[in-house]
Image: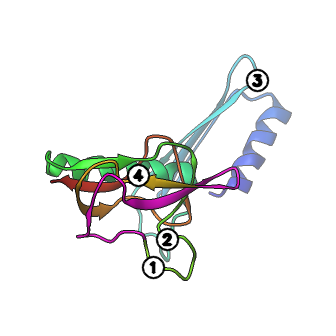
Amino acid sequence: MDLKEIKAVIDLMTKNGLSEFELEKPEFKIRVRRGADGEVTAAPVVYSAPAPAPVAPTVSPAAANAVASLAASASAAKDPALKQILSPMVGTFYRSPSPDSSAYVEVGQEVNEDTVVCIIEAMKVMNEIKAEMKGVIVEVLAQSNKPVEFGKPLFAIKPL
């Protein structure tokens, strides 16, 4: 059942004054309810049935950032000696000063407090982000040309 069919069910419920609708088929089950205030809630229950061709999921930027943050936390949890360089602002993360330039830092590279590790563009201003600690870059946790949130881990670093 696709979104168009679900909307048609809701329209029929509204037109006929129904407060609840349930449909069960071998591959899925759906229950739609209208509350006293007219708000519609749907609770689909999908059974595991052979799926057609796999479809690549679409992920919102917010979800991608959440997954990246979880992955970053997991890598730091593996080795408690690792520290993270966090984003000091909301903006777009860039690993290099221009698209055809090499990255500021690479995995395995030693950095000090004044080493520029990336740029975050915020409101058309390019802000150089420094390591602010001496260590070795262990992992790049953000994707270049993608948005980052305040406090999002950008790099994992092993302090020296």
Mark 2 and mark 4: Cα distance apart in space: 23 Å
Mark 3 and mark 2: Cα distance apart in space: 53 Å
Amino acid type at circle 1 is Ser
Image marks 3 and 4: residues in contact by CB distance under 8 Å? no
Quadrant holding the N terminus: bottom right
First in sequence: mark 1 vs mark 2: 2
First in sequence: mark 3 vs mark 4: 3
Mark 3 and mark 4: Cα distance apart in space: 35 Å
Mark 1 and mark 4: Cα distance apart in space: 26 Å
Q: Quadrant of residue 140?
A: bottom left
First in sequence: mark 3 vs mark 2: 3
Q: Nearer the viewer, mark 2 or mark 4?
A: 2
Q: Nearer the viewer, residue 45 or 78?
A: 78
| Disc 3: which residue | 38
| Disc 2: which residue | 96
Residue at 50% of width from left, 50% of height from top?
63
Image marks 1 and 4: residues in contact by CB distance under 8 Å? no
User: Is residue 65 in view?
Assistant: yes
Q: Is residue 111 above or below residue 8?
A: below
Q: Is residue 110 left or right of residue 1?
A: left
Residue 67, disc: 4
Q: Nearer the viewer, residue 31 or 57?
A: 57
Amino acid type at circle 3 is Gly
